[in-house]
Amino acid sequence: MYAPDVDPMDPRVLERNYDYAQRNVRLLSRWYDREIDEMVELLARHGIELSRNDRLQFGLFYQAIRESSDRLE
């Protein structure tokens, strides 16, 4: 699926793949074979902004992860 030198968890790759998935967490989670909450957490930890639709569905969880990440830094 990925070239050996491409890390799918690299923030730049993750953001690009989110764009390719039409900024849809549900679709991205299928591509990555991860649970939706795991994908939201990955996006939040890397500071990748959610689309408007994803914010409506997952915004509270995303914001909680962002705030906890900020406190740890």
Image: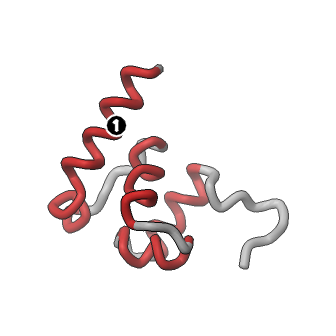
Dot 1 corresponds to which residue?
66
Type of the residue with mark 1: Arg
- Image label count: 1
**Residue found at x 80% / y 71%:** 3
Quarter of the image with the N terminus in it: bottom right
**Residue found at x 43% / y 52%:** 43
At which x and y percent is residue 38? 44, 57
At which x and y percent is residue 16? 53, 64
Q: In the image, is residue 70 above or below residue 53?
A: above
Q: Quadrant of residue 63?
A: top left
Q: Are there few (<14), some (14-19), or many (20+) residues within 10 Å of tag 1?
A: some
At which x and y percent is residue 29? 46, 71
Q: In the image, is residue 47 above or below residue 69?
A: below
Q: In the image, is residue 49 above or below residue 18?
A: above
Q: Quadrant of residue 26?
A: bottom left
**Residue found at x 41% / y 78%:** 27
How are the colours assigned in the image? secondary structure
Q: Is residue 17 left or right of residue 26?
A: right
Mark 1 secondary-structure assignment: helix
Q: Is residue 57 left or right of residue 66?
A: left
At which x and y percent is residue 39? 44, 60
Q: Is residue 15 left or right of residue 55?
A: right
- View extreme (left): residue: 56
